[in-house]
Amino acid sequence: MKASSLLTTLLFACMTLSMQAQNDFSLPRSEGQGSFGSVSSTDEDGNPRSKSWGRKERTKKTPTPKGVSQWTVDPLLGDSLAAENTDTAVHNFQWWNLTDGFCGEYQMLGNAGSPRLSRIYLHRPDADKLLFLQSYDYFIGGVADFRFTNSKSPLTNLAYHKVGNSTNGQDRVRGYFSTNINAHSGVGFLLDYLYGRGYYNSQANSMFGGSVFGYHMGERYQVHAYVNATHNKMAENGGLESDTYITDPQSLPQRYGSKDIPTNLTETWNRNDGEQYFLGQRYRLGYERELSVPDSLKPKMPNDEELMKGLADSLRLMLATDSLQRNHVVDSLRQRWQSQQIPPTEFVAVGAIGHTLNLRTMRHRHYSYATPQDFYTNLYYGDLANIMSRADALQMNNTVSLSMLEGFSKWAAMDITAFATHQFERYNQPRSVSDSTMGKETSQNLFVGGRLSRRRGNLLNYDATAQFVVAGDDIGDFNVHGNIDLNIPLGKRDTLELSAKGFIKNMQPVHFLERYHSQLLWWDNDLDKEFKTRVEGTLTNRRTKTALTIGVENVKNLAYLAAQNTLLGGHEASTLPADYSHDVVVRQHTGSIQVFSASLSQDVKLGPLHWDNTVTYQTSSQSDILPLPTLNVYSNLYLRFRIAKTLNVQLGGDVRYFTNYYAPTYSAAANMFVVQDTDNPRTKIGNYPVLSAYANLHLKHCRIYVAAHHLNSGTGRRFWAPQYAIDPMTLRFGISWNFFN
């Protein structure tokens, strides 16, 4: 079934369930209970209670109940993890739609939704099996990032973001809906559309994504279901023909606007489609435990007259004259009343049996109908005037688990889980240069592992997971990772928070680094396993608003993409892309590379004046292979105040800055960032601040911002990546509104 048809079907199912919920709903045990848990079906006057939609019935004078809780789901074991409600975040909302991130830490190509790569190494994830989707994490998420919602009333969030005008601007429309079927179950969906025309030629982006979700969080059975489909199409311009148009425009014979600057490519596109289907379910094993109730809260036995009110009038008259029979009947009524009192109980979960299914797909296409004759080094098959390269991938993980749960007794201080995962992968790309028809390759692995976790502690919490491949194509792979959080009280009003995390991994590089076949790029490699170790710690003092993070990583046998350029005849060595033919290869550094990172965040507050700062220092022992900027800085100075006790205002400006370095360049043919060719002259970017000003307003359930981004446009080496300039100054507007109904 196609993703669009599946999403339509699931959306219809969600609406049907919501409509049925209004007509077929019984109150859960936690609402409308009698003294000991019996559910009353009538009101105080004896009238039948009307059915409600997962909440108590409201009159016209009763306000709509508001309240939202959100959580994420672990894709491996299906655990529910508490999460911040980002859809209602107010602080710094003006930068929510920036591809380069809230703090400007990502290098990108300029236009909204373009591929991006974090300049802070410790923030980079491992290479994804679906490699071509990873650079679009700004738009393409997954179940690990998705927030399931439980709200007291149906919640709708509508957001619109606007940049520039109809010629070169960007638009993004986003809608999120969630409703409860009852107190334990809910459904919803997310729709997201982005269209960026771009401030430079051949740079337009079009992205659409949709997600449907549902959950049931019962005492014993719990399940999460999630379906996501994304489509993006990106025009490629290969970068500007020369940096001179940006760095020294006065030397040119005429003035060039951003749309007048020539680019290296036209009529070239990359298209990526992705889908994810996730089902996580768990059945908890345990017992019912009787709750102790104070005598003051226990129901009082009615007096004799109250007990006999239900008897027939003739019987009551007879008992009035026969005291012996009356005492006998009253004793029987007292015993009957006592037997009807059901003591309250609670379910105590001792263990759980779990299962998760996580299926992901990717379809990658590269199109070009006007490729310059000498721009690429190789054409392995086909015609330069009609390029259409394809690569597909599928990854399916099935995991079963058995857990002993934390908290069922004072001795159960942690969750203990054992699990096994079967992983199936399928790749589809051209077979060979002589036979360009699509050929399939499959891979299978069996993982076994365990997890220890503690999440309910006041002072100490931790999580440690180990996975080992015991059979399959990648036998010998292992991944051991974990984190620990410690809260150290400092007096009555202050707490020092210490968190640490780390990992040890021995992993085979992803398939597309070992084998990739296309019309312009081709490699078949036999790569060694990468061995990585990392230790990272963060010290936070909330009273002083100070956070210090220090991390060290060692990588052995790093596999990476690198540019390999060939100087064209009749040209001298330069940094102009047109002087070379271009290729991308996979290389593996057989030695070790060390990365050290230290990040300091300090927020200062003086009345309504706030000054938030984050400075990250990094160093790499092999900067030619793993280039990193020495410093990455974000500073935000603003006033925060309230008008008429209802309108919250954040008014200020910020600066983003990183020191110059040989940043990875971008390859349109690979649709990814690659290390610059060290055998030819390279280009440095950085040492250029980006200044912005904004006004961010919040009134009840509505958030509005107006921002001017890149106020200092017009001077300096303003590049996000080599040959890809930062957009000129842009005016940005956005609105987000939450509706509870």
Image (cartoon, grey):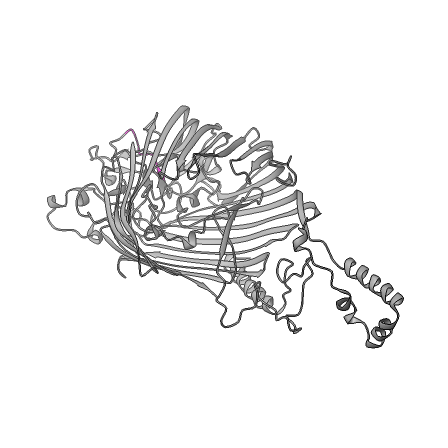
Q: Main secondary structure of the magenta part?
A: loop
- Can residue 200 be seen in this snapshot? no
In this picture, residue 523 sits left or right of residue 410: left
Query: Is residue 635 something that shows in the picture?
Result: yes
**Which residue is depicted at the point 69% across and 45% down?**
285
What percent of the width, then of the height, locates residue 525? 46, 31
Q: Quadrant of residue 451?
A: top right
In this view, which residue lies farthest toward the bottom? 314
User: Residue, x 25% and y 38% (percent of image)?
Assistant: 686
Residue 676, magenta (yes or no): yes
**Magenta span covers which residues?**
673-679
x then y, percent, for residue 453? 57, 36
Quadrant of res 356: top right
Choose between 219 and 364: the one closer to the eye.
219
Q: Is residue 287 above or below residue 8?
A: above
**Would residue 211 be found to the left or right of residue 172 on screen?**
right
In magenta segment, residue 71: no
* Residue 183 image offset from top left, x and y in percent: 59, 58
Q: Is residue 276 left or right of residue 270?
A: right
| Left or right of 634 on screen, residue 352 | right
Q: Nearer the viewer, residue 481 or 722?
A: 481
